Amino acid sequence: MRLFPALLAVFLLAAAPLYAAGKSATAKSTAKEASAPAAAPASNEPPAGYTPSPAKGGTVKAGNIEISDISTSEMADGKIDVYMEIDNEGKVPDALVSAETPISDHVVMVTIEDKKETEAPLMIELPAGKSAEFKEKKNALRIKGIKKSLKEGDKFQLMLHFRSAPNAVFDITVRRKKSFFNW
């Protein structure tokens, strides 16, 4: 019976340093976790698919969709028209189903025929291998009810939502007002 207390004593003596080391390691990691700075909020990260500031005529890709020749009208009466070409380079049809921007709550499609403008909810079918053009004096994406005044050179973000392709998010630079002498 004397053997049991002796073995217990040997076990405790051998285990004591391991227990102490484990306890201090746990205390150190807890202290590190408590003092570690919190991760930066996700809102500081640009949205997935974000492409910074394409120059006039720049190109943005979103899956099989390519957006090019991006430009704007000047700001007038709290609205800006956005012009671009959207190419569906895929083998299946897609559609531009909506758009959003932090500068306004309203983005619509505007069509101009015989100097008459018609606004409609945004829904543009994009057949496979085809393109849709938004051209000045023909049609555009119209951003209405802009929350702040924008001038030439100001930038704003636009996000296009497609039925199948990923969202396309990019900056647009407001162009200057055309004058009689700008050919």
Image: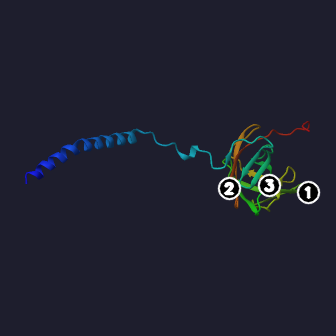
For disc 1, the neighbor class at 10 Å (few under 14, some 14 to 19, many from 20) is few
Q: What separation in Å lies between label 3 and label 1 (alpha carbons)?
A: 27 Å
Mark 1 vs mark 2: in front: 2
Element carrying mark 2: loop
Of the two numbered discs 3 and 1 on the same chain, state the one appearing first in sequence.
3
Residue 45, image x and y in percent? 59, 44
Mark 3 secondary-structure assignment: strand
Instruction: Report which quarter residue 151 is drawn in.
Output: top right
Of 106 and 125, nearer the camera is 125
Q: Position of residue 122 (x, y in %)?
A: 75, 59
Badges 1 and 2: C-beta atoms under 8 Å apart?
Answer: no
Nearer to me, 118 or 53: 53
Q: Which mark is residue 166?
A: 2
Q: Amino acid at mark 2?
A: Pro
Give the position of the C terminus as an image quadrant: top right
Which mark sits nearer the N-terminus, 1 or 2? 1
Amino acid on which disc 1 is placed: Asp
Q: How far, Cα to Cα, is label 3 from label 2?
A: 14 Å
- Mark carried by residue 87: 3
Residue drawn at point x = 83 percent, y = 57 percent: 111
